[in-house]
Structures are given as C-alpha cells and as structure tokens.
Amino acid sequence: MKALFRMIVLAYFICVVSVAIYGRETKAAADPQCELINPTKLGTYGDIELWGEKEYKFTLPCDRIMIYQVLVKNTSDKYKSFKYLNDINDIKINAPSGIKSHLWVGTIHPQPNWFNLQPKSERMMQITVEALNKDGMKNYSKKPVSLDMNFEIGEVDNRGSFGPATKHSLSIESTVTTISQKSLTKGKKCTVKICGYLKNSKGKPIKNANVLISAGWCMHNSVFTNNKGYYCVKVKPYYSKYRKMWSEYAITPRVKGYKTKTIIVKPSKKKIKKTIKLKKQTSKISYKQTKKINLGIQAYELDASADGSVIATLPFHTLLPKEQTEGKRKLTVVDKSGTVLFQKAIPSEAPYADVSDDGNYIVITSEYAGDKKSNAVIFDKEGNELYRTPDQLPLLNHFTKVYERDDYRESYCARLSNDNRLLAYSSTDGDFWLFDWKENKLLWNTCVEGQIRTIDFSADDSTIYMSAGGGFAYAFDTATGEQKWSSFIQGWGTEAVLTDKYYIVTTKSDGYALIVLDAKTGKKVWDYPVDCRGTGLSVSPDGKKLWWGDDKGGDYSPVNSAVFDLKTGKLLTVFTIKERYSAMVARWSKDGKKLLIKDGRGFGVYDSSTGEPFFEKNVVGSKTADSLCFSLYASDDLKYVVAGFNTDTDFRFGGQLFFFKQK
C-alpha cells in the first residue's frame, strides 16, 4: 500500500461525506482540497478499497509535517464502519534504513479512531507524521519511508446495528522528495534580506540590541545591531500554494528601557529595508502574589462568573493511573480574592467546567467513572448538586456496539445556555444531547463525527455551535435540532469563540489552522497559516481584534501569540514572550489596550497594539516543566488575576492556584 505525502503545513484534513446513523442525520459537504492528485489503488478488502499516492513532495527549508492520506471507498450498497486505531502501536512510522529517525506519528484524523461509510461513499483518512529534527524532511529526500497500520472493517445498517468486524494489517510505502524554493517559485524570492537600522526617538542608533525576525515553523532569526544600529539577516520565505500567500515576517526588537514595536513585512522583493524608531519606556505595572492554594494535580480547566465572584477549576490530562490521583481529584470553587467557596471530590479527572455569568450555576463533566458511566453535573455556588444527566441516554453513534461497549460513554463538553435553562452535553464519540434541565427533559439529540470539544450558544440562545474531531464545525437550531450548516475547519477544533458575526475556531492537530466563519452561513471569511497547534482565542471588547495563541512555541515556532484584524484577517501584532515558550490563553482589558497572556510557566501584560511588555513574571522557575494549565481569570481592569501553575519540581502534574493583585 502506498501512501500520500503532500507539501503542506496547513494540511487539508478530512473529506467527510456523511455519518451513518439512525434518527437525525448530520451532513457535511466534502472539502474541494481533499483529493488525491495521482491516485493509486493500495488494496481491496471485500467491499472496501484503499487509495493513495506513490510520491510526496515537500518544500524546504521549513516543511516538518508529512500527511499520509488514504482514501477509503465503500463500493457496496451497505453501511460500513472503518476503525483504524485500537492501540497507539497500531500505526508506526519507519525511517529509511541507516538513517537516525526523527519521525513520529503525531495525530490521526478523523478523531476518534473510526468513521462510518454510507453505501457508495468515500472518506479521507489522514495521518500526520512530524520530523522533529533541525533540517525537517531534508534527510529523508528520495528515500523510502514506510508506515505500518492495523485496521478493522465492520458492517452497520442504517439503524446502528453492527455485524462482525474483520481485522487487517498492511504496510504503506512511499518515497519522499524534497523540492527547492526555486523550482516552486520559478526562481523568484528564494532568498530575501531583511535589513535596517534601529534608532531611538532622536534618531541616534541603538547598538547591541536584539532584533527577532520570525515567521513560520522553523523560520526564525535572532540578530544584534552593530555599533551603527544596523541589523541584517537572510531569510527563505515560503509560499502556501493552497492559500496563495507568502509567509509574513515579524520584526520585533526587544531592548531594555524602550517600548517594543512589531513591524510586519512580506517578502515582496530581494531586499527589505526597515528603519525602526523606538520610544523610551515610560509605563510599568506590577503584581503581588496574595495567595496560593494547593490543588493536588494540575488545574487544567477554569471558568468564572462575569464579576469573578465564582471561579471553578478542575484537573485533567495528567495521563496518570487513577489510583495515583485518588484523593487529589477535586472540583475547587473560589472567588477572585482566594476564598474557597467549596471543594468536591470527583470520580475522575474532568475536562470541562462552565460557570454561568451570574455565578449561580456550575457545570462540570467527568471523563469516566467507576461504572464506566460519565455525566454532566450542575451545582449551585454553595456546592449543592442540582442536576445530573441520566446514566442511560440514547446514542446515535452506535459504533461502540461492535466492540461490546454498550455501557461505555466518555463525556467531554457541557455548556449552559445564556438564560441558564438549557444544558448542552457531548461525548468524545460525537453524541450530543440538549436538556431542559429544570424540567428534567431531553429535548433532542444528534451525532457528529469525532470528539466534540467546544459548544457555544448564540446570544439569544437560538443557535448552538460546536466543533468536532472529524474536522468540521456545525450550527444547529436550538428549538428543533435541525442542522443549519456544517463547515470544513481542517482538523480537531480545540478552542472556539462566538461573536454576533463570526464563529472562530483554532485546531490542535495537523494543519494548525485558524479559521473565521460567518456565524449565519458557516462560510469561511478568512483563515491564516499559523504554525503550531492553537489553544487560545480571545476577541477584543469592541469585537474588532482577535488574539490567537498556542501551547508549543519555543524552537517550534516563535510566533506563538498574535493579534489579527477580525474582519480582514490582517496580521497586526506578534508577541515575543521573553524566557517562555508558549501562550496558552489571554484576556483583554476592558478598553482593549492591554492583553494579559498566560502560559504554563508564567504570565505577562502587553500593549495589544505594539506588543510592549508592561509586566512579565515567570512563576514556576526554570526547573519545572510547563504545566498543562489553561486556567486563567482576569478582571476587566486586569487588577485581579487567578491562574493555575505547578511549582512542584518532583511531580510533573502537580497543581496550584495562584492569586495576584495589581499593586
């Protein structure tokens, strides 16, 4: 079996035809980019055909991501299921003989590890392989790379009843060919010089100053000015032929005592000259730590009421055996001053919390429980349980029946409507339920392909938006449950933000997409080729600007935090966060002039227009690994900050909640 590699950092993930379910059926149109250019039949397994390509081309110097694409075709008149991952070792990547491997299987789509095929339909499967070496794919050029894969094929009728599944094994072999920028661009713009002078407001040179010039996955250069304030660096811009745009470069000088200023340039000619004048830094702010609460294990998730009087946090994603977290798994509810309102033991780590704006209700989910049931639970702010979703719920995704998992349900996301009357609840397998929880009534349910990680209600509660692991975003009519639209978002949506005009999604996995959709139609307004998995989104109070951040950064991508014009997608500001390597989550000040940005080690406050740092603090120290903490509350004036970190050097997944107040 041959596989497909393609030159792409923002990969086109998945062609979805539709999902085979009974009851209400969700539909998603195929993405036009999702196709094989030179298709070759890789194998036939009964009524299922697998198709791919023989050779995959990449551009240098920045390509680090390879996308194996396999088109799965159902040639029969029956419904079929295709499961491609029972265990992480079911898919392995093998480097050419004699070459030290820097390759690893990053992600597989669609998520979770299966999909259904309607009669006479097809579906694209994509496997992301990342090259974790300095030279990207250069070492593997014109050499065979193979991928071993196990999968299962089963039969399913249109009411969700499954027959037996058959197991298969195969090896996917292909040749990687790297191509030069010159061949891609016909000799144009292969190397560009970005040069200029750094001066103060009086026109005098600033010498020995650090200037960061960055763009893309491995495209970053740090240079210093000479005695005349001159800097110059050669860069190799890359071109996204699918988005028809060149890489943009951010020139950011970081000079002590001066305001930071970011200049965005495009490689439009052989040499770009930019003289940058910096003003003296005049304003600083500072914070003092007022309290710290030991949570036992990391504060992964956090949500708060509008005024910060009720803040809920939960532990998740430690990957530790359940017995090692016994007694440490707690729902912790506090206020912004650090007063503990209540704590509740929870049966498992929990991925999601939602606090109503008025602080009267707290919703959490649990990953799993001892009886293999999981639920969404609503508490009041005193800790009294008000509602729990039923253990037995109708499932439109019946794929689990093939593997005798009838009683298993793993929940992920839950959300209250703005009027606090409705509870939206989802599973990792793509099932979704809407309850009138005060009447203890299930209103409707549906199913989409893949883990549902984000749910949002429109301001008037008339529409429900969600993104799923199958690579699509959806909008449903709240009253009827009818699907209004679906839109291809290229991957696994990790964070979403809804405004009155736009539904904005960023993805974690291969493709690393930032996509803005029209909230009414689902049509793409713009997207941007970000270079790392997106984990944070925040819209300015006036609705005009969008902040995006990631949780990787560092050597992978220095452009780990940026502000865009929300209407046009224009890149406005890039933030370089000193001594820290990611930017997971952020909050705007009420006037939109400042951004408080947090990662796994610390936080800072920055000018939202220029990137100038007003305050930066590394909370955990250099000997402690970054914690997976997306937990952040900040008051509208940024005077109060509540954030989760880990200062325990002996326990990778320890967690504490820190409270800060502006001096």
Image (tube, rainbow, N blue to C red):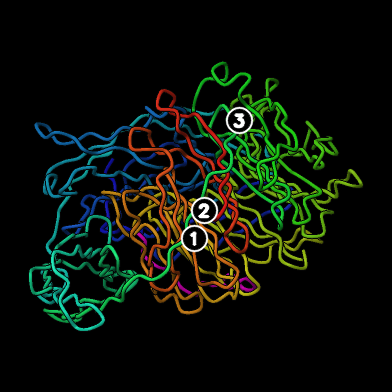
Q: Does the magenta portion include 522? A: yes
Magenta residues (range): 518-530
Nearer to us of marks 2 and 1 is 2
Toward the viewer: 39 or 544?
Answer: 544
Check disc 3 and give the amino acid type: Glu
Q: Give the residue drawn at x 44%, y 24%.
A: 651
**CB-based contact (under 8 Å), mark 2 and mark 1:** yes
**CB-based contact (under 8 Å), mark 1 and mark 3:** no
> Label 3, on which residue?
349
Q: Give the residue drawn at x 54%, y 18%.
A: 324
Image spot of residue 79 (x, y percent): 59, 44
Check disc 2 and give the amino acid type: Gly
Instruction: For mark 1, give the secondary structure.
Output: loop
Q: Give the residue drawn at x 49%, y 34%.
A: 153
Nearer to us of marks 1 and 3 is 3
> Label 2, on which residue?
493
Q: Is residue 325 left or right of residue 603?
A: right
**CB-based contact (under 8 Å), mark 2 and mark 3:** no
Label located before the other in sequence (1 or 3)? 3
Residue 342 visible, this orientation: yes
Toward the viewer: 111 or 15?
Answer: 111
